Image (cartoon, helix red, strand yellow):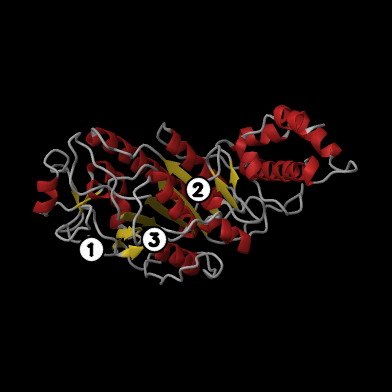
């Protein structure tokens, strides 16, 4: 069986190639709950406009800079200065219950306004002038990973954040399809040939091993998750579907520590008002259903949800009734028993912008990561984040 035939006939979902290597394949895995804490990442791709997400409703500079885009009605006022975009109404109970911490002005020195490069920086926890090939969660897996399913991304392709040197997460947008694909007769044929003589990395030995590990992981995920069926109603959109799968994984006792999801479309250079309102509505309604699902099954207390975007938008609107790429942005942290719920810090001054007209960063995003690693995942940042960031006090 040559390389061309192998790749052509396998018809794999791309996620199957993103399973950890150098681990022993297994078929019978215990399904007992480990009781460790879980992290759910929500990536708002495209650069969400943080200034119209958390609105400075008592700030003349904001309204003067955005004569058409500024939100001036139905604002959900959270204090005398800041409020939610109207589409975020489903998150109000979380805020009132002390289950949401909003961290303003999150970014990094010398911000990059390219989508791909800035996202790489967030994924790898690198400096702006540093290029890394592994992600911060991938390095966490290298340090802590023992099972191929320790991290799952609900997509067809794996983000750089989830790729380590020795361990990677699994990417799948449908665990049932993953399982059916792994049961394809071709898999069996591959495994039967695995012990054939003369296999090496030059004749697909590595890929054979990857296929075996994928089959084991797919079986474990499917067999464990199929016993739990969500009773929660979710919105009818792809992002909600991702969170519903994550809830099923968590509520079924899947021994996975990290889940990665994404909602795209936030690159609002033109006609931002309706587009962002719809996306924020999808986000808030889906998160509300997800949290309710976890609370119903008593798994919310052990789950932390982090929402970020690769950058914010410029303070001043552009000529197309949109906003251009900016810098610092807000980050949402959702969980039970947060040390500092509500607003972690004030919005940076709109009177003191950087040279491009963007909000200056106050909190390095790697401090958010470090806090989650130290205070939530109970692991040192050594070998994961090289910049030695200080920890914060939100968890």
Question: Do tag 1 and tag 2 residues touch (Cβ < 8 Å)?
Answer: no
For the point 59% across and 53% down, the residue is: 256
Question: Which labelled disc corresponds to residue 365?
Answer: 3
| Residue located 14% across and 59% down the image | 351
Q: The residue tagged with tag 2: helix, strand or loop? A: strand
Horizontal and vertical percent position of residue 158: 55, 44
**For residue 12, above or below residue 344:** above
Point out the frontmost of discs 3 and 1: 3
Q: From what the image shows, is residue 373 above or below residue 287?
A: below
Pick the front one: 111 or 95 = 111
Q: Is residue 292 visible?
A: no
Q: Where's the N terminus, which quadrant?
A: top right
Question: Circle 3 sits in a helix, a strand or a loop, which is it?
Answer: helix
In the depicted structure, whether residue 21 falls above or below residue 391: above
- Look at mark 2 in the image and give the residue it sits on: 260
Q: Quadrant of residue 379?
A: bottom right
Residue 22, percent across and down? 73, 54
**Neighbour tally class for label 3: few under 14, some 14-19, many 20 plus, Cα within 10 Å:** many
Q: Nearer the viewer, residue 90 or 363?
A: 363
Q: Earlier in the sequence, mark 3 or mark 1?
A: 1
Whole-percent x, y for residue 111 in the image: 34, 56
Disc 1 element: loop
Q: Which residue is mark 1?
A: 346
- The image shows a total of numbered marks equal to 3
Mark 1, Cα crowd under 10 Å, few <14 / some 14-19 / many 20+, is few
Give the distance between the C-alpha atoms of the residues marked 3 and 1, in whole angstroms. Answer: 16 Å
Q: Nearer the viewer, residue 262 or 303?
A: 262
Which residue is rendered at x = 65% and y = 40% of the image? 16
299 vs 331, left or right, is right
Residue 16 is left or right of residue 51, and the answer is right
Mark 1 vs 2, N-terminal side: 2
The label number, if any, that marks residue 183 in the structure image: none
């Amino acid at each position: 069986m040559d390389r061309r035939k192998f790749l052509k006939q396998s018809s794999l979902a791309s996620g199957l190639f993103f399973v950890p290597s150098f681990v022993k394949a297994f078929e019978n895995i215990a399904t007992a709950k480990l009781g460790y804490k879980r992290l759910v990442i929500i990536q708002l791709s495209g650069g969400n406009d943080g200034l119209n997400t958390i609105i400075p409703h008592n700030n003349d500079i904001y309204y003067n800079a955005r004569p058409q885009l500024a939100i001036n009605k139905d604002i959900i006022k959270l204090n005398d200065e800041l409020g939610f975009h109207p589409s975020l109404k489903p998150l109000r109970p979380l805020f009132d219950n002390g289950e949401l911490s909003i961290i303003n002005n999150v970014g990094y020195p010398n911000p990059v306004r390219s989508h791909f490069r800035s996202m790489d920086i967030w994924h790898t926890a690198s400096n702006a002038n540093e290029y890394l090939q592994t992600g911060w969660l991938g390095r966490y897996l290298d340090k802590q990973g023992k099972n191929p399913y320790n991290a799952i991304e609900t997509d067809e392709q794996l983000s750089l954040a989830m790729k380590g040197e020795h361990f990677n997460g699994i990417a799948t947008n449908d665990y049932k399809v993953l399982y059916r694909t792994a049961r394809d007769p071709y898999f069996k044929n591959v495994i039967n040939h695995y012990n054939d003589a003369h296999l090496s990395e030059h004749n697909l030995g590595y890929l054979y091993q990857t296929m075996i590990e994928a089959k084991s992981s797919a079986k474990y995920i499917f067999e464990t998750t199929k016993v739990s069926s969500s009773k929660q109603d979710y919105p009818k959109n792809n992002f909600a579907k991702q969170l519903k799968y994550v809830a099923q994984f968590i509520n079924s006792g899947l021994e996975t520590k990290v889940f990665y999801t994404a909602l795209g479309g936030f690159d609002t250079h033109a006609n931002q008002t309706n587009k962002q309102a719809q996306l924020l509505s999808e986000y808030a309604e889906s998160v509300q259903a997800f949290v309710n699902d976890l609370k119903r099954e008593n798994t919310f207390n052990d789950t932390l949800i982090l929402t970020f975007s690769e950058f914010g938008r410029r303070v001043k609107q552009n000529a197309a009734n949109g906003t251009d790429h900016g810098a610092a942005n807000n980050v949402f942290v959702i969980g039970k028993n947060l040390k500092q719920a509500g607003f972690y810090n004030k919005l940076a001054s709109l009177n003191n912008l950087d040279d491009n007209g963007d909000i200056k960063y106050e909190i390095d995003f790697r401090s958010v990561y470090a806090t989650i690693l130290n205070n939530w995942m109970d692991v040192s940042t050594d070998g994961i984040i090289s910049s030695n960031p200080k920890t914060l006090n939100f968890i």
